[in-house]
Amino acid sequence: MIGTGFIYGVAGLMFAAFAILSATDRTNPKRFGNGAFYAVLAISFLLGGKLGDIGNGVLVLALVAIAGSGAMGRGGRATTTLGERRAEAARLGNRIFLPALIIPAAALGGTVLFRAVPSLVDPKQATLVALTCGVLIALVAMQLWFRPRIATPLAEGVRLMDAIGWAAVLPQMLASLGAVFALAGVGDVVGGLAGHAIPEGSLIGAVLAYTLGMALFTMVMGNAFAAFPVMAAAIGIPLLVRHYGGDPAVVAAIGMLSGFCGTLMTPMAANFNLVPAALLELKDKNAVIRAQIPTALPLLAVNIGLLYWLGFR
């Protein structure tokens, strides 16, 4: 059956190509650092299943060492000139966004199709397999339509990855941190503290503790996926679901949405809030956060209300 092996294989080959292109980019004085970073990522995707926990741990430490030592930099390899890009944008107009729509359309259609044929694709991975297929289909469509050089999509991918830098892997790192916290029993500790703070029999108190806790933990940890295992173990499952009989799907979904409100308000979510400021060369590195707070706070209040009214019917 087609599953995560296919997804990881595609990602691994992409990062392997990035590693080669980066290492051969003479315009980047730190090309070997970039090449090593992408090569480690490629190894983790292609061989991670065979390396075991210790092997993958070593790869993670290697990523941290490369990124933390300042060995990475932005390359200067250009696939087109500024004039060529302007002329192409003027010629295509908004049609240039059509290939990007192929990806979500293929992900949706593929998910429905793959689940209807469970013997072909692992049902648990149907959406991710469909998403990967959508990316490949979009890539072929763009090659046929724009007819760039074969290496152009990969070179543009390297350019984008260089601009984002190490922050590209931050979500995976923080999600793993959340799992470590959950296994270490942090959720039980937080649950014990919350039990003393929430009035006995107060549903609204439990809802507030859960949603605000998701937002605050996300602001501290930088990612809602890292905060969720902790808050679910502390309040979501034992109080909202088991004690008050809440709908698990609603509790989980709105809990994550509450966490995403915290994502909008923290510099710890570097890939969402600091990287855009750097790419736009803003003088205030927190400008993105300042612009998002007026949206995040009302949205958090709405999520609190939705969980209280929809989760306990």
Image (cartoon, grey):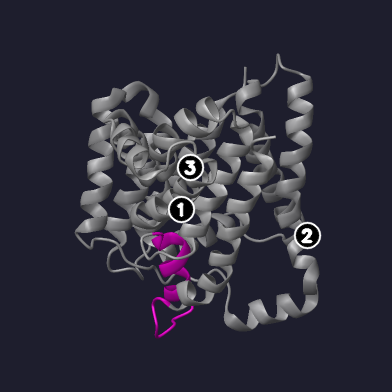
Q: Amino acid at mark 2?
A: Leu
- Where is mark 2, residue-wise? 98
Sequence-first disc among 1 and 2:
2
Mark 3 falls on what kind of element? helix
Sequence-first disc among 3 and 1:
3
> For the residues carrying marks 3 and 1, which lies nearer the camera in this image?
3
- Where is mark 1, residue-wise? 212
Q: Is residue 283 magenta?
A: yes
Mark 1 falls on what kind of element? helix
- Where is mark 3, residue-wise? 206
- Compared with 70, 139 (above or below) is above
Sequence-first disc among 2 and 3:
2
Do residues under tags 1 and 2 come within 8 Å of each other at their CB atoms? no
Q: Residues within 10 Å of mark 1 (few under 14, many from 20)?
A: many
Q: Quadrant of residue 118?
A: top right
Residue 92 pos. (x, y %):
79, 72
Please indicate, yes or no, whether residue 281 appears anywhere in the rendered image. yes
- Compared with 110, 276 (above or below) is below
**Distance between mark 3 and mark 1 Cα atoms:** 10 Å
Where's the C terminus, which quadrant? top right
In the image shown, does 258 or 1 lie closer to the viewer? 258
Mark 2 falls on what kind of element? helix
- Compared with 254, 184 (above or below) is above
Identify the magenta region: 269-286
Where's the N terminus, which quadrant? top right
Residue 290 pos. (x, y %):
47, 76
Please indicate, yes or no, whether residue 16 appears anywhere in the rendered image. no
Q: Is residue 150 magenta?
A: no
Residue 178 pos. (x, y %):
36, 39
Viewed as shown, does residue 32 lie left or right of 232? left
